[in-house]
Amino acid sequence: MLKKITAAVLSLLTVLSFSSCAGKQETSESGKVKVTVSFNALKEFTAAVGGDKVEISTMVPDGMEPHDFEPKAADIAALSQAKVFVINGLGMESWAEKAVAAAGNDNLIQVNASKGATPLKSADDSADEEHGQYDPHLWLSLKGAEIEVKNISDGLYEADPANAEYYKKNCESYTAKLESLFQEYKTKFSAAKKKTFVTGHAAFAYLCRDFGLEQSSVEDVFAEGEPSAKKLAQLADYCKKNNVKTVFVEKMVSPEISETLARQVGAKTVAIYTMEGAEDNKSYLDRAKANLSAIEASLKE
């Protein structure tokens, strides 16, 4: 369960109210637009579009689930000086509204990167008032990433219209790379006879929608709590009946449980990326291709 925003963060409201008339530092000393993003995938999208015109700070540190993040005073202070704030939306950052209120930045341009996407409803019990009713993992879909990149481009244009053509060109270039990768694997997955794979975390529904695939997962969309013995037994039966040879695991989501499942059914474990934090010094595109390649290989087993 997410914690409420800390008293230290809320105490900044008083400080910021006195400093609000002093002028916002929405550009860096080098003249770059200051952008705060919630987590790593959005940082990469923003960097791809913003190039050398933006200075990016990331709120959620590597190794932490954005669902579980609790903004600190320094995060709110940075947000109070930002020109643009980029979130994924779809319930991923349930803390964002309070963080923005605490920052007291009236000039802040907020970008909901998932705006305009067709969301998938979460079938999990964890889809409650805290998280909302939708699966938030849009960025793991290449088509979803295209939507997010476009929304970020629009936000940067609003913040810095003088460089609109620069942002547009970068957006088109990066989107072309996403689309090229999508088309490559659309062909490969269309030819695959098997269409299902097993993951530790139900984070790949949008990716599955892209390619007509289906995921079966150890943990739910929000990866909260441990799966019941009944659910694990059902998944083990599924793996045995379908001759599953690979169980995908993530570093931040109960890898031990996925590893136990793999041992029970005689399968191997293979790492899969969620792009919530920086991983293995690889770019978003590199990790996306690694995910797709690994899933394709598992379908051939």
Image: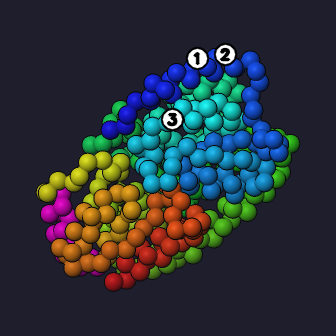
Question: Tag 2, which secondary structure?
Answer: helix
Q: Amino acid at mark 1?
A: Thr
Whole-number angstrom distance, CA of label 3 to CA of label 2:
20 Å
Q: Which residue occupies 72% across, 47% down?
A: 55
Pointers 2 and 1 in contact (C-beta within 8 Å): yes
Q: Which residue is mark 1?
A: 14
Name the residue that disc number 3 marks.
Answer: 72
User: Looking at the image, is 230 positioned above or below residue 285?
Assistant: above
**What label sits on residue 290 in the rendered view?**
none
Amino acid at pointer 3: Lys
Q: Residue at x 54, y 72 (%)?
A: 289
* Disc 2 crowd, CA 10 A, few/some/many (<14, 14-19, 20+): few
Q: Horizontal and vertical percent for residue 246? A: 32, 76
Position of 111 relative to 249 (above/below): above
Check disc 3: other Cα within 10 Å, few if <14, some if 14-19, many if 20+.
some
Residue 172 magenta: no
Magenta highlight range: 231-245
User: For this rendering, which residue is in front, 236 or 24?
Assistant: 24
* Residue ID for mark 2: 18
Q: Is residue 279 found left or right of 165 in the rendered image?
A: left
> Could you tell me which residue is drawn at 16 percent across and 69 percent down?
237
Q: Is residue 46 left or right of residue 119?
A: right
Q: Is residue 98 above or below residue 268?
A: above
Q: Secondary structure at mark 3?
A: loop
Query: What is the secondary structure assignment of the residue under circle 1?
Result: helix
For label 1, the crowd category at 10 Å Cα-Cα, with few meaning under 14, some 14 to 19 and many 20 or more, is few
Residue type at mark 2 is: Phe
